[in-house]
Image (cartoon, rainbow, N blue to C red):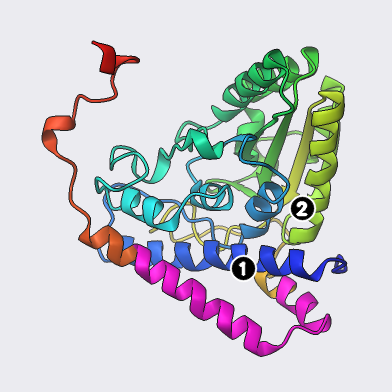
Amino acid sequence: MTVTNDLEFEQTLYREMLLLRRFEEATGDAFSRGEIPGFTHLYLWQEAVAVGVCSQLTSADQITSTHRGHGHALAKGLEPRALMAELYGRSTGVVGGRGGSMHLYQPELGLLGTNGIVASGGGLACGAALAAKTRGTDGIAVTFMGDGATDHGATHEAMNFAAVLELPVIFVVENNGFSEGTPLAAHAARTDLAQRAEIYGMVGVRVDGQDVLAVAEATREAVRRARKQSAPTLIEAVTLRKTGHFVGDQMNYLLPEGWTAFGRDPLEMSRQRLTASGVADDWFTHIADEIDSVVGDSIEFARQSPWPDAREVTSHLFAGENNR
């Protein structure tokens, strides 16, 4: 386990991970009660990846996400109220109730969108990175994807594009062992995903996705490489999906034997490290109460928020529509 050298930094990371955990638990409960329409995919037990990666980014850096994107959005700074209201389909949601669980956007935070289309984020991140490079800023782009997306042609095209043009983009593969219910070895000849970077001439790193400090350190180096050398990186974070692929998935399938993330809760790992560094139980209790209050408030805010006005259904269909 990585040792805590910066106590305040890890306390911040722990708080962020706990926010993701409690928010997703509340989301699952609300969905099960029928309060959230549509579909939802929870990020439980993968919190160290989103938090570790986003801890190294600025608001000017941009991310693209997946259908399992609530955690990425929160880690990038999206307000819990705005996110929960969006899940509830209310007008106060981050995109006015139009996007729901899988389509969250807030460009001013660098959130270029969660996306229900597998492997769609790589090309979008490359576009953002190319724009930053063309404008001469030091901004970078990060794309999160699952292990299943690594076998899509769009991902390979994006990686090759990033390598050829030397773009400041980071490909983060959240390898939780399954592409929905299919184990990686059943559809990929090579399961050492980080080594795939070699064929594109980029650096590939495999990291413990349950250790938030390990993820942060790997990302810190990738960010340095992107900003200083305008070079892409592939990070494979080996993690664990606590629940099924979606709410309601009975998860009647087994992880590969010896899966290194099995049974390792990133929050518990961080708590043990903080406790060993002298953090008292009272601090954890205080943070839990604070987070529970924030999440409870987001639920009530969503419940009390109005539904979208049907007269606005055609808004935002065209660029520059305000000038029409």
Question: Against 45, is 58 above or below?
Answer: above
Q: How far is the residue under mark 1 from the one under mark 2?
A: 16 Å
The residue furthest left is 311
Which stretch did the figure color magenta? 270-298
| Disc ID at residue 274 | none
Left or right? Give the position of 178 relative to 256. Answer: left
Q: Main secondary structure of the magenta part?
A: helix
Which of the 4 image quadrants contains residue 102?
top left
| Disc ID at residue 15 | 1
Residue lying at 62% horizontally and 39% vertically, measured from the top left = 144
Q: From the top left corner, tell me how far across and down residue 247 is, in percent.
A: 40, 57
Residue lying at 52% horizontally and 47% vertically, measured from the top left = 73
Residue lying at 41% horizontally and 38% vertically, measured from the top left = 103
Q: Residues within 10 Å of mark 1 (few under 14, many from 20)?
A: some
Residue lying at 28% horizontally and 55% vertically, measured from the top left = 36
Question: Against 186, is 71 above or below?
Answer: below
Q: From the top left corner, tell me how far across and down residue 164 is, in percent.
A: 79, 12
Which one is nearer the viewer's eye here, 218 or 285? 285
Q: Secondary structure at mark 2?
A: helix
Q: Amino acid at mark 2?
A: Val
Q: Secondary structure at mark 1?
A: helix
Q: Amino acid at mark 1?
A: Arg
Foreground label between 1 and 2 = 1
Residue 293 magenta-drawn?
Answer: yes
Q: Which residue is mark 2?
A: 215
Answer with mark 1 or mark 2, whichever residue precedes in sequence.
1
